[in-house]
Image: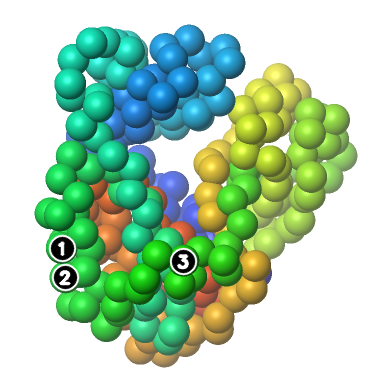
């Protein structure tokens, strides 16, 4: 799993920078709206909304923005109903498999944009089901392993975490998606700072990528994530941590 946590940490830092430009707020608000639309506006009993609101708070999204997004999802307006969740599957440089989560009001536009971005950066769009089988949907929490030890993470196990591993100085805590919020809350109640927490599609196996392919792949992922309709990009690459930091930096 070399470099995986390093990449997750880099993405988390970039998200903070994006939030300062206001770019991330649009995506976060859309996620809140769709979660409220699908499961109701009460946090209790709606894990998807809990996660969306927590991610918004992590990015310092104003409370008023969060409340408006929830109201939009639970209201009678047509805006929320017009947003579709779409998953695109494809391939990047080095034969890396990609899962691209999007929320869009125009499937044709977003599909064309994703296809164009993939082709521009040496990738290709696949058929539905072509790569999804290579991933598992899991809750993923990252904690700084230089600040905390395994004993500090025992509350996570007690709250339902399924596995804890140390990858490049970062603890990866895996949960069932529905247990993510509870495990994060248990850690924070115990005084453990969480670097990031998300529901992600984690690869069952990884494809080693190096050299020019590594640089091209990261540029592709960044270009996809820069699309306003793309919520997240998941990939099964394995890039050495020091190479990853140099290329991403």
What is the x, y in percent for residue 154?
85, 35
> Given this view, does label 2 or label 3 mark the residue nearer the observer?
3
Mark closer to the chain start, 1 or 3: 1
**What's the mark number on residue 65?**
none
The residue at which mark 3 appears reads as 129
Label 1 packing within 10 angstroms: few (<14), some (14-19), many (20+) = few
> Spatial distance from mark 2 to mark 3, Cα to Cα?
20 Å
The residue at which mark 2 appears reads as 116
The residue at which mark 1 appears reads as 112
Q: Nearer the viewer, residue 109 or 244?
A: 109
How does the figure colour the protein chain or chains? rainbow
> Given this view, does label 1 or label 2 mark the residue nearer the observer?
1
Identify the residue shown where x is 62% and y is 48%: 138
Q: In the image, is residue 55 above or below residue 113?
A: above
What is the x, y in percent for residue 47?
55, 25
Q: Seen in the image, is 2 located left or right of residue 19?
A: right
| Residues at discs 1 and 3 in contact (Cβ within 8 Å) | no
């Amino acid at each position: 799993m070399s470099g995986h946590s390093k990449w997750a940490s880099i993405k988390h830092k970039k998200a903070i920078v994006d939030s300062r430009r206001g770019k991330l707020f649009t995506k976060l608000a859309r996620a809140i709206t769709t979660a409220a639309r699908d499961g109701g506006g009460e946090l209790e009993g709606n894990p998807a909304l809990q996660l969306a609101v927590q991610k918004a708070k992590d990015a310092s999204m104003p409370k008023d923005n969060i409340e408006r997004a929830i109201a939009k999802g639970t209201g009678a307006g047509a805006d929320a109903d017009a947003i579709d969740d779409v998953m695109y599957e494809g391939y990047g440089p080095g034969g890396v498999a990609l899962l691209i989560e999007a929320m869009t009001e125009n499937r044709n536009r977003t599909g064309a944009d994703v296809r164009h971005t993939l082709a521009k950066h040496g990738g290709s769009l696949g058929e539905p089901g072509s790569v999804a089988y290579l991933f598992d949907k899991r809750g993923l929490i990252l904690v700084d392993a230089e600040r905390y030890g395994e004993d500090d993470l025992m509350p996570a196990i007690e709250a339902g975490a399924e596995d804890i591993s140390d990858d490049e100085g970062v603890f990866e805590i895996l949960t069932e998606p529905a247990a993510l919020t509870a495990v994060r809350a248990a850690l924070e109640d115990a005084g453990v700072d969480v670097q990031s927490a998300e529901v992600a599609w984690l690869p069952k196996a990884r494809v080693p990528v190096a050299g020019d392919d590594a640089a091209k792949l990261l540029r592709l992922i960044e270009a996809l994530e820069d699309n306003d309709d793309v919520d997240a990009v998941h990939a099964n690459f394995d890039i050495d941590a020091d190479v990853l930091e140099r290329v991403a930096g």
